[in-house]
């Protein structure tokens, strides 16, 4: 089996890279990509152990973007992990996240919800902090009854404590991924609350679409499969597993990917041990 979209504690997943590999092994998933938000730390910690377990792993990342195309997630695969541009960008994005979270925390404080940036950073076990960590800190202080409820009420785009992300567009993500030797894939196009501007993404050089996804309906998968074939795009698929009991608990390897798609990835993207 194959799963091309998963998260670890390097970003907002609940499992360490080692635990995620054990999960994949127990479910007979032989080809994986760890796609943590704006970092490859999870991949770097997993690659040697994956080899020992007989699991093939491809470098992956999920870029969080915001720009003319709205808040899109762009998955990058197969890039050069030693490229100085990639390393610089990840460092820059991580620092921007800390500054961004500090602004959100300040807004929460003005709304009467007393939390600190340090509390949020302590929730982030890895190098990347996300808004979910802020919601967890708010929940621990008793300001709501669930992480998702707090996120929706205060932290999602347009909510009272929301702060726009630092400028980093889908075009930026696609171009940076290409410059570092990778391919760029639009993540989960069926779950956005707005219409995806596919024409613009194609102009920027988008390589593929995550067609087979845990939260896509059968109709959505059929639609995006047609779009991918129409534009001669790579098709991908994944669970977006964040851990058991998380907001994305869909098990590793639970998304069915057509045989011809798995064959392309296995032959073209996964390094031989």
Image (cartoon, rainbow, N blue to C red):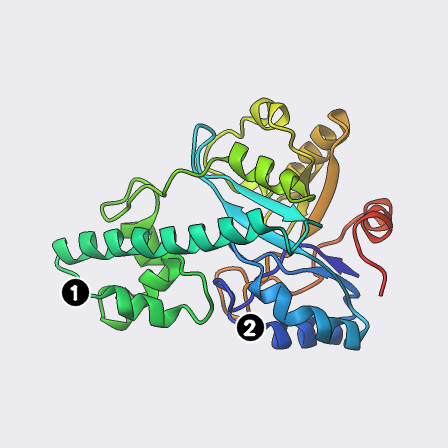
Q: Quadrant of the N terminus?
A: bottom right
Q: Residue furthest front?
A: 84
**Mark 2 near mark 1, Cβ–Cβ under 8 Å?**
no
Q: Is residue 127 above or below residue 154?
A: below
**Can residue 185 be seen?**
no
State the mark number for residue 199.
Answer: none
Nearest the viewer among 132 and 215 is: 132
Mark nearer the N terminus (2 vs 1)? 2
Where residue 143 sits in the image (x, y, percent)?
22, 65
The tally of labels here is 2
Where residue 109 sits in the image (x, y, percent)?
15, 58
Q: Is residue 90 above or below residue 10?
A: above
Where residue 258 sits in the image (x, y, percent)?
81, 47
State the mark number for residue 114.
Answer: 1
State the mark number for residue 15.
Answer: 2
Quadrant of residue 128 within the rendered picture: bottom left
Mark 2, Cα crowd under 10 Å, few <14 / some 14-19 / many 20+, is some
Q: Is residue 175 above or below residue 15?
A: above
Judged from the image, the secondary structure of the residue bearing numbered disc 2 is loop
Nearest the viewer among 248 and 86 is: 86
Q: Quadrant of the C terminus?
A: bottom right
**In this rendering, position of residue 83 left or right of residue 2:** left
Where residue 215 sits in the image (x, y, percent)?
59, 50
**In this rendering, position of residue 161 left or right of residue 268:** left
Residue visible at 75% across and 53% down? 256
Nearest the viewer among 239 and 221 is: 239
Nearest the viewer among 1 and 184 is: 184
Residue visible at 62% across and 71% down? 45
Residue visible at 26% across and 64% down? 117
**In this rendering, position of residue 268 left or right of residue 179:** right
């Amino acid at each position: 089996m194959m799963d091309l979209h998963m998260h670890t504690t390097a970003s907002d997943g609940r499992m360490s890279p080692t635990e995620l590999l054990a999960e994949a092994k127990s479910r007979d998933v032989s080809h994986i990509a760890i796609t943590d938000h704006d970092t490859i730390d999870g991949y770097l910690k997993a690659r040697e152990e994956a080899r020992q377990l007989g699991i093939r792993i491809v470098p992956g990342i999920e870029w969080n973007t915001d720009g003319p195309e709205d808040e899109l997630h762009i998955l990058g695969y197969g890039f050069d992990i030693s490229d100085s541009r990639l390393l610089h960008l990840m460092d820059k994005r991580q620092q921007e996240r800390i500054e961004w979270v500090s602004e959100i925390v300040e807004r929460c404080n003005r709304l009467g919800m007393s939390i600190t940036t340090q509390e949020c950073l302590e929730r982030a076990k890895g190098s990347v902090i996300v808004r979910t960590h802020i919601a967890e800190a708010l929940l621990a202080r008793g300001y709501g009854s669930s992480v998702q409820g707090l996120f929706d009420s205060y932290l999602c785009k347009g909510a009272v404590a929301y702060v726009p992300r630092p400028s980093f567009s889908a075009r930026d993500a696609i171009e940076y991924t290409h410059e570092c030797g990778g391919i760029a894939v639009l993540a989960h196009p069926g779950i956005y609350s707005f219409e995806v501007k596919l024409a613009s993404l194609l102009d920027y050089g988008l390589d593929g679409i995550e067609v087979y996804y845990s939260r896509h309906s059968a109709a959505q998968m059929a639609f995006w499969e047609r779009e991918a074939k129409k534009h001669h795009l790579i098709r991908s698929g994944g669970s977006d597993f964040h851990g058991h009991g998380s907001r994305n608990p869909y098990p590793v390897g639970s998304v069915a990917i057509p045989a011809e798609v798995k064959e392309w990835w296995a032959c073209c993207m996964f390094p031989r041990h």
